Image: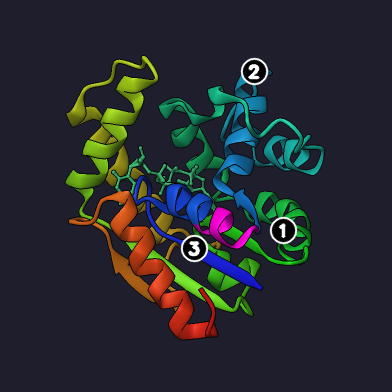
Amino acid sequence: MIIAIDGPAASGKGTLGKRLSEHFSFAHLDTGLLYRAVARVMLDRDLDLNDRDAAHEVALNLDVTHLDDPRLRGAQMGEAASVISGYQPVRDALLAFQRGFAEQPPGAVLDGRDIGTVVCPHADVKLFITAAPEERARRRHLELQNRGEQTEYSTILEDIRRRDERDMNRVSAPLKPAADAITLDTTHLDANAAFQAALAFVKAKVGRA
Ligand code: CDP
Ligand code: CDP
């Protein structure tokens, strides 16, 4: 069974993906970390983020065993990831790993921007998670504060709006709900309420919970 979760930055995809994967004892992949990891190698090597060929090369040789590195979660990495994720060859290079991950028994949960549309168009369940930009900025602000990163709320809100704009309007795999996705607006739902709502959707769709 494959559960695909897509949505904009800080909508709660990762948190929900983790909860659902634990509930069903499935593997979980936050695919944003792959793009963040490519960006990280580029920045570490002082490579220009506008250099598509360099980004492609890094993506082809990406070591996917260190995705739990907390440095990947920083704001700078999210911004850089959204630049290199616009390059189709980078996306292609990361596709086989994601599809292979999705196929593992007894099931997998993948979250990102194009899971229901490109990576796993045949996923059993597709969820599209949204929330108002102000609420997403509030969540991300709190999260970064807890990690000791001091960033202004207004800067985070701007970053989120810019990233939404870029992710939704790019040519390669733009962020949009799959035709058969269920949209869940979590603006007024905490993480637990979002999980309960998603679980109800999964149950209705595949008849198990
Ligand atoms: O956690 P947050 O939603 O802020 O970001 P993320 O999911 O880690 O993704 C970082 C960036 O990677 C996004 O802004 C997208 O541009 C890109 N991304 C993508 O293009 N496709 C995916 N499946 C996942 C992320
Ligand atoms: O993966 P994505 O960027 O979409 O978001 P996340 O990392 O799962 O969630 C961002 C932050 O919002 C986390 O600190 C979550 O605990 C929090 N959150 C929330 O307050 N309410 C929700 N319904 C979901 C997440």
**Is 85 drawn above or below residue 208 in the view shown?**
above
Q: Mark 2 points at which residue?
A: 44
| Amino acid type of the residue tagged 3 in the rendering | Ile
Q: Are marks 1 and 2 in contact (CB under 8 Å)?
A: no
| Amino acid type of the residue tagged 1 in the rendering | Leu
Does 98 appear in magenta? no
- The x and y percentages for residue 52 are 65, 41
Predominant secondary structure, magenta span: helix
Q: Name the residue under label 3.
A: 5
Q: Say if disc 3 is inside 8 Å of ligand 2.
A: no
Local crowd size for mark 2, using a 10 Å CA cut-off: few (<14), some (14–19), many (≥20): few
Local crowd size for mark 1, using a 10 Å CA cut-off: few (<14), some (14–19), many (≥20): some
Q: Distance between the residues labelled 1 and 3?
A: 16 Å
Question: Which residues are the magenta region?
Answer: 20-25
Which mark is in front, 2 or 3? 3
Q: Please tell me which residue lies in front, 53 or 187.
A: 187
Q: Is mark 1 on a helix, strand or loop?
A: helix
Which label number is shown at residue 184?
none
Which label number is shown at residue 95?
1
- The x and y percentages for residue 145 are 30, 21
Quadrant where the N terminus is found in the figure: bottom right
Q: Say if disc 2 is inside 8 Å of ligand 1.
A: no
Q: Residue 21 sits in which quadrant?
A: bottom right
Horizontal relation, residue 178 to residue 130: left or right: right
- The x and y percentages for residue 207 are 52, 85
Q: How far apart are marks 2 and 3 (CA)?
A: 30 Å
Which mark is in front, 1 or 3? 3
Q: Please tell me which residue lies in front, 54 or 105.
A: 105
